[in-house]
Image: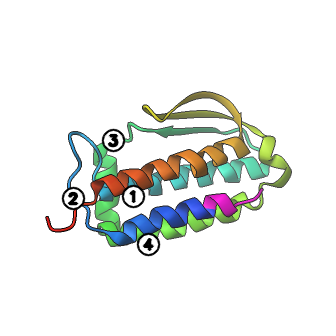
Amino acid sequence: METAELRRAYEELLREVTLGGFGPPDGDGLNAEQVLAHLVANDELLTDATEAVLVGSPYAYYELDTIHRPQLDDLVARYGGLDGLTDRLRVTSDQLCGLTEQVGDRVDALVQTRLREAPRLDIDEALPWGRVLDIHGRVHLPAHADDLCLLREPAGD
């Protein structure tokens, strides 16, 4: 499976992170650290599912928008905030991309998938694993890069 698009999506997201200057979210949204914690946790889920696909094991992938804030806050604390989460995301994204390159003919393996990030994603069905990874690179990561951009405080504040 080609991973250039997935790697590019991670690079763009990490570029947003390195620009920094994040303020608090509007309303009930996630702050920048929580967004990165969510992505780190999701990468770990995607990695587990990809490893299962590679060995032919049945697996269900549930990426939930409702990952509880205490879990995200625990990850923020574990990795020491934004810098540590950024480093961890570089590791998890590289691991996932490396595994994705090995998927080969298993790209069409069906995996029960639940993606719920309203209003952007609402999927609950068996999908070919390559399609799930494509959604991650083309929809999920860019959406969170946009979230980070929106969290950036205007210059001069």
Task: Identify the element where label 2 is drawn.
Answer: loop
Instruction: Give the residue pinned by disc 2.
Output: 23
Give the numbered dot on residue 87: 4
User: Residue type at mark 3?
Assistant: His
Q: Is residue 146 above or below residue 94?
A: above
Instruction: Give the residue pinned by disc 1.
Output: 36
The part of the chain drawn in magenta is 1-6
Q: Position of residue 8 (x, y in %)?
A: 60, 63
User: Residue type at mark 4?
Assistant: Asp
**Among the 4 quarters of the image, the one containing residue 111:** top right
Mark 4 → mark 3, Cα distance in angstroms: 22 Å
Q: Position of residue 129 (x, y in %)?
A: 71, 43
Give the numbered dot on residue 68: 3
Residue 108 in view (yes/no): yes
Type of colouring? rainbow
Q: Position of residue 105 (x, y in %)?
A: 86, 50
User: Residue type at mark 1?
Assistant: Leu
